[in-house]
Amino acid sequence: MNGRLTRRGLIVGAGGALVAGCDRIGKSAVAKTTFKGAEALTMSAQRLVTDRAALAPEFGAGDISPIFRSNGNATPGTPEYARLLAGNFRDWRLEVGGLVDRPLMLSLDDLFAMPKRTQTTRHDCVEGWSAIGRWTGVPLRFVLQRAGLRASARYIVFSCYDSFGGAPYYESIDLVDALHPQTILAWGLNGHRLPVPNGAPLRLRVERQLGYKHAKFLRSIEAVASLDGIGHGGGGTWEDVGDYAWYAGI
Amino acid sequence: MSKARGKLVYRHRLPTRLWHWLNALTIFILLMSGLMIFNAHPRLYWGAYGANRDHAWLTIRGNQAIGQLTIGSVAIPTTGVLGHWKDQQGRIQTRAFPYWATIPSRYSLAGARRWHLTFAWLLIGGGCAFVVASLINRHFVRDLRPRREELAPRHIWRDIKDHARLRFPTGEAATRYNILQKASYIFVIFLAIPLMILTGLTMGPGFDTTMPWLLDLFGGRQSARSIHFLCAMALAAFIGVHLVMVVLAGPYNEVRSMVTGWFRLRER
């Protein structure tokens, strides 16, 4: 009988230790290194098994969500943004700079005049929900071509009008995703101009990654060689603030 | 406890034992970090999309007064457990699953994803190694494949009655898996775990580009998420029954045989 009780105690003890232990282990340097390693492995494995040009699934008109949920900031809420919105974004300009030969200042009309792409895709939030919407915009690669991306550029950084806890929202992707045909700077949703809660006047759609990569309320695009020194160096606001994965393919 | 000492038989080979204990850890961490990921959006849908205003077939909600699990149109009060529980400081929290069931114990979607996606590699890697080893050492063919006589309804019914009466096999019969054991291990190894992995991959927008047929197979990302959750609950139920059976069958002997491989036969 004694053996049985001890063993049962052991099982219960192990269960309790698992919960408490995991919290402590999760904060250790070894765990952080392991998690980062697993994250790199996940990204490499995904890039290995997926064709780099593989397209995200596209849907029919009947699949569109009745309501496209807005998440995060529903508006930047700053006087500057309010002024731009009041002027129907006539004074808004997208700044394209960094490692490019011809820095640009693009108005919405400039973007409307560029080749456009419309795609009905599924937006996957890291939290677990999904919404399907019909996006229209300029493929990012056309904008980068016009600006003349330099050979030293490795990442594209997106800066936004909104902020979290005082830190301006930003995101970044590498050139594999930046030059992908479904990566667009979207100005339209479901046949209308992009609504404010969904990122007016312009947002990023990077369809093969989770929602937090799809920066809303775009202000500028910068081509860079490294993500070091930008924000806290994590490659994005949620990566910096919330410790989320930089590559959000799963 | 045992009056007569039965003879020792070699019951579990090394790959089986290694995979068992790796999974004992891996599955617990995957289940508990999975519950924390669920906490970020405690609603389940069927189909390709589903967000707050869409029809959810399962929700876990809570406020300062009550906790409630809703499945379809059935509302089940869960105050004190789901959607309404007290944290270590005695404060009422309204997340779906309580701190003692989740990894990390404090709300962290990013942290839970780190645990989940890291241990998913162990589940996939360990599972593949186990399948290869079990094909080579014929564990599947010799031990898991049901024999024709075992599939006879009379045999299955007798086995169910034996389990219900807690009559455990003695002598040589105890060296083989009985048909209910075979059925549950086959369910876990060939159905539940592969389904967990495939539905998990289906939730990844990057992975969907390579195998979009998985979306068709499971009926969309939100259906895949629902199936993922249901399989996790089935695995949790399996673990519960498994642990009860170990305790009832004699935990010392059972655990020893899973550690060393050697099992002591009970005399008739």
Image: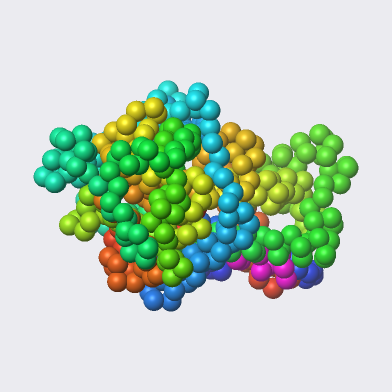
Visible residue check, residue B266? no
Residue lying at the far bottom of the rendered structure = A30
The answer to which image quadrant residue A229 occupies is: bottom left
Give the x, y percent position of residue A5.
51, 64
**Relative depth, front residue between A148 and A75:** A148
- What's the residue at 50%, 23% (across, down)? A62
**Residue A147, picture quadrant:** bottom left
In percent of width and height, residue B198 lies at: 61, 48
Q: Is residue A23 above or below residue B217?
A: below
Which span of residues is magenta-colored?
A: B14-25
State which quarter of the image contains the N terminus of chain A: bottom right
Magenta run includes residue B23 = yes
What residue is drawn where x is 47% and y is 38%?
A: A117
Name the residue at 43% across, 66% down: A150
Indicate the quadrant where residue A47 lies.
bottom right
Q: Is A220 in front, or is A213?
A: A220
Residue A151 is at least partly visible in this image: yes
Left or right of A192 in this view: B73: right
Residue at image coords 14%, 40%: A82
Question: For residue A235: magenta?
Answer: no
Q: Is residue B135 left or right of residue B16?
A: right
**Relative side of A244 to A44, left or right:** left
Q: Is residue B87 left or right of residue A191?
A: left
Q: Position of residue A130 (x, y in %)?
A: 44, 38
Figure check: A232 above or below B30 = below
Q: Is residue A42 above or below residue B5?
A: above
Q: Nearer the viewer, residue A75 or A96?
A: A96
